[in-house]
């Protein structure tokens, strides 16, 4: 099992550009999450999904959209990137009844 | 508020014990977690404790939970240089009508192990 994978690992965007981050898990987990990690602030939840086709907002959803068309994939989109979205983005997944979230390796995004 | 608080830095000598402390806010949190993050890497789940437990031991790791004070600690026995990393505590909060939970993370404690 690869676990949770994220692509790309690094990306530099100019303000106003768009991009999509891909998270994939091969553990058949129902729940998937996107977090961002900023210095001195820990990780904060952006959006999450409780199943295929169902998404919900977390603590810091503004400027992001998500989609979960397939159970194993959870996409995070930035329609018009801003410097405030410079961060490290982590995806996580979890199965029902076992309260362990497994994290991917992260995507480091810089918006100039 | 939702703040989970940790001290920012801890330095120990190899072979000593390390104790990383955390205070959380929600007394209804069901699970409390410790994650480890090495430089440039993702978060690795080290251990977690259910809220009705006081202590959990797993090899060199001991987690102590004081629910009255909302205090969680992680003790690493015989600390090695490979334990150098950032350690995050996290509490769980039910979301989506209780169907799942989200994690509220502390800011992380950087553990530096001196040889």
Image (tube, rainbow, N blue to C red):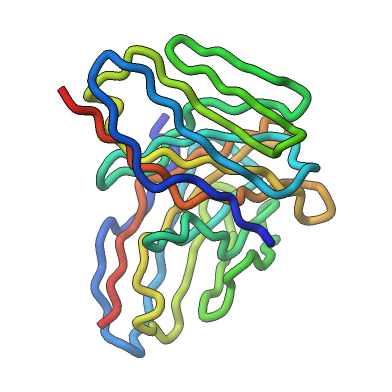
The residue furthest top is B59
Residue A18 place in picture, x, y as percent: 38, 81
In the image shown, does B21 or B88 lie closer to the viewer? B21
- Name the residue located 74 percent from the left edge and 33 percent from the top edge: B67
- Against A62, is B33 above or below? above
Residue A83 place in picture, x, y as percent: 34, 82
In the image shown, does A14 or A27 lie closer to the viewer? A14
- Name the residue located 69 percent from the left edge and 62 percent from the top edge: B1
Residue A9 place in picture, x, y as percent: 28, 56
Residue B109 place in picture, x, y as percent: 40, 43
In the image shown, does B78 or A99 lie closer to the viewer? B78
- Name the residue located 35 percent from the left edge and 43 percent from the top edge: B9
Occupied quadrant, residue B37: top left
- Name the residue located 62 percent from the left edge and 66 percent from the top edge: A59
Q: Quadrant of the C terminus of chain B?
A: top left
In the image shown, does A111 or B83 lie closer to the viewer? B83
Occupied quadrant, residue A12: bottom left
The residue furthest left is B115
- Against B79, is B11 above or below? below
């Amino acid at each position: 099992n690869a676990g949770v994978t994220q692509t790309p690992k690094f990306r530099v965007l100019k303000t106003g550009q768009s991009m999509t981050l891909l998270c994939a898990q091969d553990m058949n987990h129902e729940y998937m999450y996107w977090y961002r990690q900023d210095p001195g602030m820990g990780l904060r939840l952006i959006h999450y999904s409780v199943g295929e086709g169902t998404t919900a907002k977390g603590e810091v959803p503004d400027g992001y959209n998500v989609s979960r068309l397939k159970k194993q994939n959870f996409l995070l989109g930035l329609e018009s990137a801003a410097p405030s979205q410079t961060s490290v983005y982590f995806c996580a997944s979890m199965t029902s009844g076992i309260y362990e979230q497994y994290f991917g390796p992260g995507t480091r995004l810089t918006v100039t | 508020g939702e703040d989970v608080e940790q001290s920012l830095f801890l330095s120990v000598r190899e072979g000593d014990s390390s104790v990383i402390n955390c205070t959380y806010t929600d007394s209804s949190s069901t699970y409390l977690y410790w994650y480890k993050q090495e430089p440039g890497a993702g978060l690795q789940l080290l251990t977690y404790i259910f809220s009705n437990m006081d202590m959990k031991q797993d090899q060199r790791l001991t987690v102590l939970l004081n629910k009255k004070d909302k205090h969680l600690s992680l003790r690493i026995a015989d600390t090695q240089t490979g334990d150098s990393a950032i350690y995050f505590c996290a509490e769980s909060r039910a979301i989506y009508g209780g169907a799942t939970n989200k994690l509220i993370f502390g800011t992380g404690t950087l553990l530096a192990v001196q040889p």
